[in-house]
Image (cartoon, helix red, strand yellow):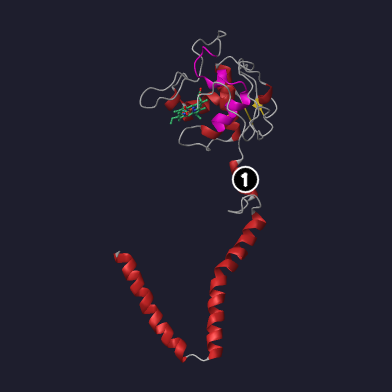
């Protein structure tokens, strides 16, 4: 009530001086002022069209934002898939990895890869019975043993570790750490040099233990039994 009354009052107030001005105005001036008011109404539309035009030129799909620069795409596009074709140059061995592990990882994952204690409950990184073939599904959640692809271990460390300092390892260090973790899980020999060539060829013990997922396409039904 109060609001609508004050709005009405404001409208009346603004109408009164407006009428007085109109009475004093001659015809050409009125036309000019009408034309100006018309232009004022069109201005926002013109701006939207101008902006829309330049946005459309840059982002044809959604019409918002801008196309990322090649440098920005390079910084985000760091995932490494099963074939390892995205792997950067560099190399490392288990011996080098053991040294880096002690400095960068042992504080959370334990000196012997046994996993951290409270409050830093980082998971174990080695199967419980080294030297023996253990069913990867019984070995617990050990990425460098259970993963179907060795490249996934590289990718995980490169993107996610050390926790809170992600992105601070060089490619050589990630190759070395991957070699160390794979060696400690009896997946590779101690002296194997891992690089973009050799890493994708490493055969993980659980290579065929995972069900292949169908390629997802928009509007695909959920997998049967999928819980969510
Ligand atoms: C600040 C503590 C911390 C540090 C330092 C750290 N990690 Fe981790 N790491 C974790 C935690 C916590 C997880 C579990 C993350 C999760 O479940 O999402 C993890 C998970 C992992 C995993 C996956 C384990 C699995 O089986 O799923 C790997 C591999 C790993 N870390 C390697 C490393 C390496 C190599 C380093 C050293 C470069 C490192 N971490 C340093 C805390 C840490």
Q: Secondary structure at mark 1?
A: helix
Q: Is the residue indicated by label 1 positioned so its CB lies within 8 Å of ligand 1?
A: no
Q: In screen coordinates, is 52 left or right of 14?
A: right
Residue in the foreground of this view, choosing between 180 and 67: 67
2 w.r.t. 143: above or below: below
22 w.r.t. 104: above or below: below
144 part of magenta stretch: yes
The boundaries of the magenta stretch are 137-158
Give the percent coordinates (x, y) of residue 143: 54, 22
Q: Residues within 10 Å of mark 1 (few under 14, many from 20)?
A: few
Residue at 58% x, 18% y is 183
Answer with the quarter of the image where residue 154 lies. top right
198 part of magenta stretch: no
Give the percent coordinates (x, y) of residue 144: 56, 21
Answer with the quarter of the image where residue 213 lies. top right
Residue in the foreground of this view, choosing between 105 and 219: 219
Give the percent coordinates (x, y) of residue 125: 50, 20
Residue at 55% x, 17% y is 184
Residue at 55% x, 29% y is 156
Residue in the foreground of this view, choosing between 6 and 79: 6
Give the labeled residue for mark 1. 73
Give the percent coordinates (x, y) of residue 63: 61, 54
Quadrant where the N terminus is found in the figure = bottom left
């Amino acid at each position: 009530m109060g609001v609508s009354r004050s709005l009405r009052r404001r409208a009346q107030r603004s109408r009164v001086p407006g009428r007085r001005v109109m009475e004093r105005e001659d015809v050409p001036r009125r036309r000019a002022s009408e034309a100006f008011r018309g232009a004022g109404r069109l201005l926002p539309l013109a701006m939207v069209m101008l902006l829309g035009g330049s946005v459309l030129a840059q982002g044809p799909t959604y019409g918002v934002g801008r196309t990322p620069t090649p440098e920005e795409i390079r910084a985000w596009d760091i995932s490494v898939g099963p074939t390892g074709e995205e792997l950067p140059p560099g190399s490392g061995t288990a011996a080098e990895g053991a040294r880096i592990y002690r400095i960068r990882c042992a504080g959370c994952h334990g000196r012997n890869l046994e996993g951290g204690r409270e409050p830093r409950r980082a998971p174990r990184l080695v199967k419980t019975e080294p030297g023996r073939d253990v069913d990867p599904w019984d070995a617990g959640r050990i990425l460098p043993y259970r993963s179907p692809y060795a490249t996934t271990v590289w990718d995980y460390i490169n993107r996610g570790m050390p926790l809170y300092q992600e992105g601070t390892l060089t490619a050589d260090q990630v190759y070395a750490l991957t070699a160390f973790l794979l060696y400690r899980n009896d997946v590779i020999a101690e002296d194997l040099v891992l690089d973009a060539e050799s890493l994708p060829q490493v055969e993980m013990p659980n290579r065929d233990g995972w069900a292949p997922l169908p390629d997802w396409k928009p509007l695909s039904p959920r997998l049967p039994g999928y819980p969510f």
